[in-house]
Image (spheres, grey):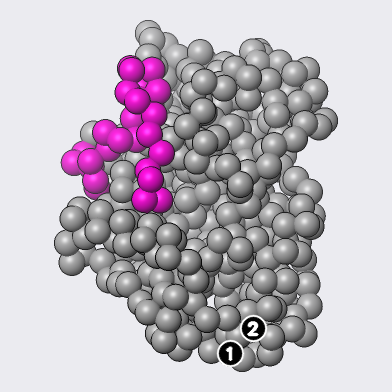
Amino acid sequence: MGPKVDTVADDTSLPAQVDVVVIGGGIIGVSTALYLSEKGLQVALCEKGHIGGEQSSRNWGWVRVTHRDMREFQLSIESLKLWRNLDAKLGINTGFTQCGILYMTAEDDAMEKHRVWLDKARNLAGDAFDTREVEGKEVASLLPGSSRKFKGGLYTPGDARAEPQKAAPAIANALRKRGVKILTPCAARGIETSGGRVSAVVTEHGAIRCDSVVVAGGAWSRLFCGNLDVDIPQLMVKASVLRTEPLEGGPTCSASDKRFAFRKRADGGYTIAAGFRTYSDLTPDSFRLFFKYIEALKSQIGSLRIGIGERFFEELRRPRRWALDRPTVFEQVRTLDPAPISEYTDAGLREFTKVFPHLSNARVAQRWAGNMDVTPDAIPVISGVDTVPGMFIGTGFSGHGFGIGPAAGKLMADLVANDTPLVEPNAFRLNRFSDGTKIVIDAGF
């Protein structure tokens, strides 16, 4: 079972018409709804399960600029600014805490990669962020009780953490008080068009007329958009984590090396993972999209494990086209809740207790996994759809969505309203996958 997520009351009473319908109640969907509503637009958000039920509540909870792909670096800087004011602005508690994030290493080649990234970031942003190279002595001071000597690393004091099980629900509850319709459980079955542009979203409870729709469906976005012949190259990658019972005397910063990663939680425990180790099921889409993902596969050698199981046959049997007047898979599967890989989570915990032997009494409270929506270049799609005027897509955040969620939502709202965009959106356009642009994995990431 996934983690326990804060509650947002069910509501399935549809408005007849709004300006914009947002499909998906994760951090991207609720952030988009927030900034659309701030522009004075009438917004309804449809979530088939519960708010924050999938990857938005299952991630590490890091809010960082450190080691971002350069194409989303400015977005991460803007997102951190928004996170810092979000709780006070909305009168909520997302658990946001400026704790600092450390990437440490004991290896020379890893230190050189850190320096390469830092040089790129400084060339792009100047003094707009506070990341610095640290030596072993400072690493030791940031990791009190560590039994391992690290050569150094990168440290960003301004980076932060928040609570994934609280954030999206807290924003959704605040939006409801502001008059935004938060509809759950309410699966969107599809989009209707009139005269070639968006005219309505059809849900399991009826239709909502609208001028624009934002698809922020996470791992479901490719399937949903395919019914309109909108092709999003996107696959699912599973990441597993655990949380411990409360522990005293551990580090307060969040940190990672290639073996493990951790962050302190608001409940006093730690969220721990085995570095960046992930798993992906082979599916029919794996073969359809194989040539687009070659560079991504090369970049993940040693950290990604691939297997085949029941999911291959489930997706092979699943219709890729459907009528909107009958139940769909979105009603049949309300929440993706994949089984965690205990081998991974236990490896992360072993490393954690090796490095911090005074915390060897750590007790596992829960393990879970989540499916990340990953694009071929590992950066998101935040874009209008050229072939369907009024349709916009925010998906493919490749495990980065929680941290950059507020800025991604604000950028999306700017695009929908045709306002000056928060950051240059060209790198996030959907048609980069079809216009001959070379797929590149940022080597500094």
Left or right position of 105 against 219: left
> Image point 78% across, 71% down: which residue?
365
Which residue in the protein does label 2 denote?
356
Residue toward you, 70 or 215: 70
Q: Where is residue 9 in the image (x, y as percent from the top left)?
A: 65, 55
Mark 2 or 1, nearer chain start: 1
Residue 434: image quadrant is top left
What is the magenta range? 419-445
Q: Position of residue 100 (x, y in %)?
A: 42, 75
Left or right position of 98 against 298: left
> Image point 35% across, 77% down: which residue?
134
Residue type at tag 1: Gly
The secondary structure type at the circle numbered 1 is loop
Residue density around tag 1, few if under 14, some if 14–19, many if 20 or more, within 10 Å? some
Question: Which quarter of the rendered picture does the N terminus lie within?
Answer: bottom right
Furthest toward the front, the residue is 108
Whether residue 97 is situated above or below residue 23 in the rendered picture: below
Which residue in the protein does label 1 denote?
145
Whether residue 163 is situated above or below residue 378 in the rendered picture: below
Q: Where is residue 67 in the image (x, y as percent from the top left)?
A: 39, 57
Residue toward you, 212 or 309: 309
